[in-house]
Amino acid sequence: MDQVQFPILSFIVFSPLVGAALCLLCKKGETARMTALLTSIVNLAFCLLIPLKFDPLSAAFQFQEKKEWIASLGISYHLGIDGISYLLVLLTSIITLVCVLSSWNYIQKKLKEYYMFMLLLEVGMLGVFLSMDLFLFYIFWEAMLIPMYFLIGIWGGERRVYAAVKFFIYTMVGSVLMLVAILALFFIHKEVAGFASFDIMDVMKIVLPAKVQIWMFAAFALAFAIKVPMFPFHTWLPDAHVEAPTAGSVILAGVLLKMGTYGFLRFTMPLFPYAARYFSPLICTLAVIGIIYGALVAMVQVDVKKLVAYSSVSHLGFVMLGLFALNMQGIEGGMIQMINHGFSTGALFLIVGMLYERRHTRLISEFGGLAKVMPVLFTFFLITTLSSIGLPGLNGFVGEFLILVGSWQNNIYLTMLAATGVILAAIYMLWMFQRMMFGEVKNPKNKNLKDLSLREIIVLLPMMLFIFWIGIYSQPFMRPMDATVENFIKNFNVKYKATVELPEGSTGLILDESDLELSEE
Amino acid sequence: MVNELQEAAQNTITQWAWLIPLFPLAGVLINGFFGKKLSKTTVGLLACFTVLCSFLLSIACVAQLAGMPVDARRVIVDVFPWIAAGTTKIMFGIMLDPLSSVMILVVSGVGFIIHVYSLGYIENDPGYKRFFTYLNLFTFSMLVLVLANSLALLFVGWELVGLCSYLLIGFWYHKDSAADAGKKAFIVNRVGDFGFLLGMLAIFWIFGSLNFKDIFHTLEINAAVTPWFMGAGTMPVKTALSAATPILGLPLVTIITLALFLGATGKSAQIPLYVWLPDAMEGPTPVSALIHAATMVTAGVYMVARLSMLFALSSTTMMVVAIVGAATAIFAATIGLVQNDIKRVLAYSTVSQLGYMFLACGVGAFSVGVFHLMTHAFFKALLFLCYGAVIHSCEHAFHDAGSHADPQDMRNMGGLWKYMKITWFTFLIGSMAIAGVPGLSGFFSKDEILWKAFNAPFSLTIGGFPLGSILWAVGALAAVMTAFYMFRLIFMTFHGKERLPQNAHPHESPPAMTIALIVLAFAATVGGYVGVPHVIKDMGINVGNESFYKWLEPVFEPAQTIIAEGGALEAIDFSNGGEEVGVQNTLAAGITGLNFAKHGQEGIITPEAGNVAVAHRESENEAAATHSEKQSAHENVALEKKLMNISIVLALLGIFVAFIMYNRNPQIHHDIREGLGVIHTVLLNKYYVDEIYYYTIVLPGRVFSEFFLWKFFDVCIIDGIVNGVALLVRGVSAVVRRIQTGVVMNYALVIVIGILAILAYYIF
């Protein structure tokens, strides 16, 4: 355990909270906006310290901070970062900064509150990724819901209230079950281990009987599956996306959906390895259905935001397929695909938002021939579209390819079906692209659209940077994962074996640290 | 990394071959980012210059390669890692061997000529700079494709050329037809890519690598591998490849190669995925010449040739490749007979010629396929560029004359030879080359393909005829049609009555264009002499010394050996043995034992048994092969001469018929057309394949997705349940709400009752 002098992770999580408080103190909305911008820049600066010091060869949590909080219940304030959360933290910080910039002119009412919620949301997201205590995790998890609810409910489109409530309730249903499971896990752990703890370093050591694992897995998985969203729990997503303001959609797609996949990877799979393997065929099947279903439904959308929303269902299906392949290639592919989706789909929503600001419509049929009117937007849009399709040389391919490689070893037939997603993605994306960008400019309202401003270009540039960078040279992104994922798989197998060998009627078993360490050799 | 390699290789030129694709990429970056600030001429010349650099470096590299000993002619340079996860490590790197050296010369050479030609062709287009940026991007991608050191990087190039094709077909994106065609090309290709991807995954999990070097080496020594199926058993690679699959019980290698071949049918426009290529003619003509005739569409042939060792292991796949090739050759030729749009005729002609290349590969004559690829690149690029000149000229002439006649429709032309003599003459050379007139490049390559097809190593017979002779007949028939439709083009556009709109005066093209035509015409004439067939040498004419085939020999030798020895794999059923033996590691050995038993020897159950079995079978076949070969060698030469004479006669016949129908007595073709009636309509409408695809796949897919999946399943069922639950909760809470009366006394009462109840529980 390497305790660092400077509590960098706390700074990362709570600097936006300070910013949010400052936003409320501002008299003018414009000042709040500037405060939010500066806060997110500072936050990114803190985050960029991590790559400098992060040891990619270590599988352990790094930069750990631990303070007792409610000692009697074994709850502590415990933060840490490892190969699984590393990229997601950076992604969150970058996406937030981009979102603040992209909202610059779009948000006209209640600026103070808007930016406050945005920063609060960032606190929640970073907290979720960095928590090493189940209780702390759950608090951040729930806390994150509220600012998102308001972002959709106040600054959203026409049906914003319906969408916000749907979003809230859908997620709550899952969260409540997860809370029950967390508490159950706590009590079982207390009984087996003889002391109370919510700390995942302690809880991870428990091996539960197969039946218990299956029930608990189901409770956790439902919460996370709704968040991902996996087919058939996805219907909140199109509504939320369509009604959310641009930045809301970007954060939703870029980061919030990853909460689900992250949850699977951080908690559900390592805690309940037996159940993970037991449910793997079901989850992979749902993932593949999601890939194809999402793509087919995306194809026939008339609203471009809905199209992108359904495409997310398809892309996240790939991520789940990779994670539940339960091997190196699949998991690393799934992880890199989470990041890829953040950048590609984030950029798509940004572009759609830029068009919406100009035309106040999201209907594909309202556009057409924009390539001629807005050549700069055309170029960005093209790159993003191709990234989303999975063109080799851009980021999407790296993830998809590794996922398919991993999944192939798990189940060939599902992989073959999943690979049809490659064809379908080209169909729905290119068809949309053609209808919006090519042809003559038929709608007179599109004749004099202004091309992107410098601010808008600056907003999109970081996304493009990562689209190319990950696509051409993925090493810096993949390397920090290697040790963690390798260790993850080893521990997974050790615990799986221990579950199978558990005597009948046992309530559980606590593995020695040495059991898990042994597996690291 | 580069420095290390440099030291190791003593600073040789081939170590710098990875720069070949990077020149055009530099052009893309410079013109893409700073194009706005540069002048038009600078952009165009820079684009040409970068390709010229690639071409010169290619020549230098190939020259050095030629100086090496035959066995050592394979240079591999790993540049930097691309993807790495677990055991999956994929490098960006290049492999220069005789096959890729032919390709880089063709791509950069023809590419350079077409770049120069475009300077003139695209001069007045507002998208001038965009055009050259895309064209450079294409050259980069294509060079990556052919120089790739692994299947994964080949796939990168494969997809990137697809992207360039998409962008360039839709270059005039304001036209809906162009945008449609671009999208169609990309999507149809994606269907092929699906197969490619699956083939690649299977290869990875058998060979543990996607590097060509590793794949070839593993195959050559039949090394032990650990394939993904049946747990972690280790077995010789050929045993693994012969595992029976559930798909018709075919061996694994057949499924893999068929999947890869699906990819090839996409990129190289073969049945059933050829439909995008004719539409691709919406792009500017230089694009059609470069991408959709000379280079990109041959990528499928290149891929099959590159993996010849793998394809040769499956006689089923080889047969499929040959049959698809021959079928496409004749199918597309029949459509080409009646089209009136010049570029469409040429497009179908390309589809047809690509069919010949696959026919060659399918019968195991990979080097002949590549030879035809090269000669076709010369004469087809030439033909397209000539017609580009015609269209370009007519467009201006028609426009100036105030006519809206279609400048691509031959019915609006005739007698053009007077106005553009260079174009006419070079086109004539190109047409003779493709028609198979003796002495020109196309003759040598096509004739050799037909001969190889006739001798195809297939045991299948249809109606008493061996498959090979049927393939030959189909190919020969398609050759007549080729000669016919090409000369139909010539007579309809360059000769006969002028049907131009009034006051239209076409004229010869600018020098940038005509020079390109002359260079290509030269190549189309002499390009064939590097591969003059053996039989002609027997006739006392000794030119070129078969240098092309000798050059490629080291690349295709392993595949040739496999075919000659009948070493194609048969399916072995793994599933039963697995349960009996139980232990996975001995499983493979058990199965090879089974395989061995078929050959009459039993008892040896070792992992090497597979090797022995294969070797045993090979030696058996070898003996049989050499015996029959000697016997028939003499008859063969006579037969080959006879067949060659037939194909010459057929080519001349095609030309003669075209002459009669379209020049001598034009009335005849009207009569024939009416006589053919329905057949003519079907051909003119391209067998209605587009329509069939639309009504069987596109439309049902769209309707199903929109009405069933989205509006019914998503909105009604799933959301219906969600909203239903919400309503239910609301209903229940409306009832339950009444309990919350808000009167404190009531709550107190409930609390008291509750406490009493709990106390009661504990007391009793």
Image (spheres, coloured by chain):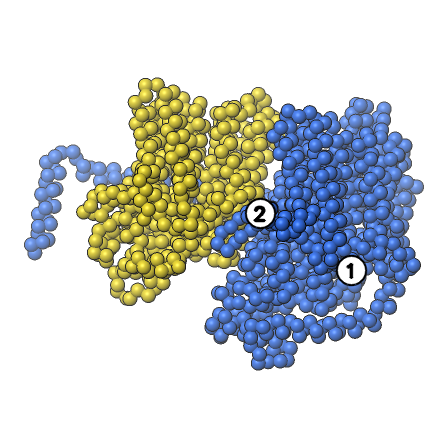
Chain colours: A yellow, B blue
Task: Name, please, the residue furthest toward the left.
Answer: B763
**Discs 2, 1 touching: Cβ within 8 Å:** no
Indicate the secondary structure of the residue bearing disc 1. helix
Q: Position of residue A341 (x, y in %)?
A: 47, 41
Disc 2: CA contacts within 10 A as few (<14), some (14-19) or many (>=20): few
First in residue order: circle 2 vs circle 1: 2
**Image point 45% across, 43% down: which residue?**
A338
Vertical placement of A327 versus B419: above or below? below
Residue at point 85% right, 46% down?
B525
Is residue B221 placed above or below B620 in the rendered structure?
above
Q: Position of residue B261 (x, y in %)?
A: 65, 54
Decide if residue B728 is in sight here. no
Q: Is residue A89 above or below residue B540?
A: above
**B666 up-or-down from B10: above or below:** above
Q: At x 57% / y 35%, what residue is drawn?
A: A382
Q: Nearer the viewer, residue B527 or B625?
A: B527
Q: Residues within 10 Å of mark 1 (few under 14, many from 20)?
A: many
Q: Which residue is painted at 41% across and 28% down in the image?
A: A100
Answer left or right for B457 relative to A333.
right
From the top left corner, tell me how far across and down residue A53 is, in percent.
40, 42
**Which element type, helix, strand or loop, lies under badge 2?**
loop
Chain under disc 1: B
Does residue A476 appear left or right of residue A506 in this picture? right
Residue A11, can we see it?
yes
Q: Where in the figure is residue A430, as x and y percent of width and height?
A: 58, 38
Locate the C terminus of chain B and report the quarter of the image it occupies: bottom left
Residue A307 shows which numbered tag?
none
Q: Amino acid at mark 1?
A: Ala
Amino acid on which disc 2 is placed: Met
Circle 1 residue:
B453
> Which residue corresponds to mark 2?
B1
